[in-house]
Amino acid sequence: DFRKATRIVRTPLRLPVKPNHVLVKIISAGVNASDVNFSSGRYFGGKTSDVASRLPFDAGFEAVGIIAAVGDSVSDLKVGMPCGFMTFGGYAE
């Protein structure tokens, strides 16, 4: 049950942004089947100990948003640009 396996945890933003990173204001994040399967223990053989060793886990494998800040070494992306990504943490800050 994805709803039971997840919770919202509020944390302060990590500012300033690291040199090669960008901060994205998330507009929309999908619930991927992998999010549901991971949180239900269907991955890693379904053993509670195997899943627990990989938690907590930043759910959200896909998201779209607007770039809110860029690190010092980022030159090809600018604040205000729309973006989309597919990686862990689509529900994160």
Image (spheres, rainbow, N blue to C red):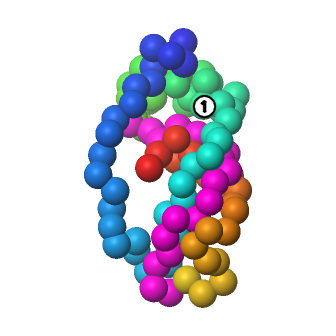
Q: Quadrant of residue 16?
A: bottom left
Q: Residues within 10 Å of mark 1 (few under 14, many from 20)?
A: some
- Find numbered disc 1 in the image and state the secondary structure of the residue it sits on: helix
- Asked whether 21 or 65 is in front, the reply is 65
- Asked whether 56 or 15 is in front, the reply is 15
Left or right? Give the position of 25 relative to 84: left
For the point 60% across and 87% down, the residue is: 75
Residue 8 image point, x, y percent: 39, 31
Q: Is residue 53 visible?
A: no
Query: Magenta region: which residues?
Result: 56-73
* Type of amino acid at the residue the image marks with label 1: Asp
Residue 26 image point, x, y percent: 57, 49
Q: Quadrant of the N terminus?
A: top right
Q: Quadrant of residue 77?
A: bottom right
77 relative to 7, above or below:
below
For the point 38% across and 36% down, the residue is: 56
80 relative to 50, above or below:
below
Question: Does 57 appear in magenta?
Answer: yes
As drawn, which residue projects farthest toward the left? 12
| Residue for badge 1 | 35
46 relative to 79, above or below:
above
Residue 4 image point, x, y percent: 45, 14
Left or right? Give the position of 17 relative to 79: left
Left or right? Give the position of 2 relative to 85: left
Residue 38 image point, x, y percent: 56, 29
For the point 61% across and 77% down, the residue is: 78
Q: Is residue 24 visible?
A: yes
